[in-house]
């Protein structure tokens, strides 16, 4: 932007411009996008992965489909949980776990404090 103002003020100035003045706004835009969009998303993914890897027996979970239950078995990549009083066991992949009751309670406490 400053280049255009300088060129308008001095008609004898060179028509080009240094590569730095042309690339600087583009680089600043990418840096800004990283801190506004990419970095928070990576933090959220890391937190969700830690939650899924720290699942323990008896913990209340909710799947991405909305099914809730208590964990009865955890393997490397799957989780088996029981739903309701009829004790139906469902086995899902770990990536299908959306949240735990403990994480929901922590989130509720954070929003109450604000």
Image: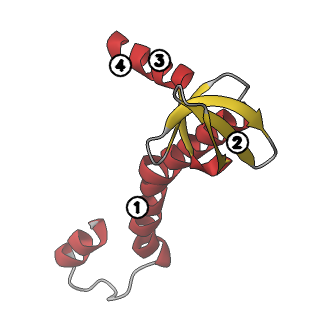
Q: Are marks 4 and 2 in contact (CB under 8 Å)?
A: no
Q: Nearer the viewer, residue 55 or 35?
A: 55
| Mark 2 and mark 1: Cα distance apart in space | 42 Å
Closer to the eye: label 3 or 2: 2
Position of residue 40 measured from the top left corner of the image (x, y, whole percent): 49, 44
Q: Which residue is mark 4?
A: 111
* Among numbered discs 4 and 2, the one appearing first in the sequence: 2
Q: Are marks 4 and 1 in contact (CB under 8 Å)?
A: no
Closer to the eye: label 2 or 1: 2
Q: Nearer the viewer, residue 27 or 83?
A: 83
Q: Nearer the viewer, residue 30 or 101?
A: 101
| Disc 3 crowd, CA 10 A, few/some/many (<14, 14-19, 20+) | few
Q: Are marks 3 and 1 in contact (CB under 8 Å)?
A: no
The circle drawn on residue 29 is 1
* Among numbered discs 3 and 1, the one appearing first in the sequence: 1
Position of residue 62 measured from the top left corner of the image (x, y, whole percent): 51, 36
Q: Secondary structure at mark 1?
A: helix
* Among numbered discs 2 and 1, the one appearing first in the sequence: 1
Q: Is residue 106 left or right of residue 55?
A: left
- In the rendered image, which quarter is residue 25 located in? bottom left
Q: Are marks 3 and 2 in contact (CB under 8 Å)?
A: no
Observer able to see residue 114: no
The circle drawn on residue 79 is 2
* Among numbered discs 3 and 2, the one appearing first in the sequence: 2
* Among numbered discs 4 and 1, the one appearing first in the sequence: 1
Q: Secondary structure at mark 2?
A: strand
């Amino acid at each position: 932007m400053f280049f255009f103002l300088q060129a308008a003020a001095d008609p004898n100035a060179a028509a080009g411009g240094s590569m730095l003045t042309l690339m600087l706004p583009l680089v600043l835009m990418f840096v800004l996008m990283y801190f506004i969009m990419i970095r928070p998303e990576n933090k959220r993914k890391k937190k969700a992965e830690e939650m899924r890897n720290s699942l323990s027996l008896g913990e209340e979970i909710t799947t991405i489909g909305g099914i809730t239950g208590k964990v009865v078995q955890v393997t490397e990549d799957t989780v088996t949980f029981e739903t309701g009083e009829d004790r139906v066991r469902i086995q899902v992949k770990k990536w299908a776990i959306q949240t735990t009751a403990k994480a929901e309670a922590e989130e509720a406490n954070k929003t109450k404090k604000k």
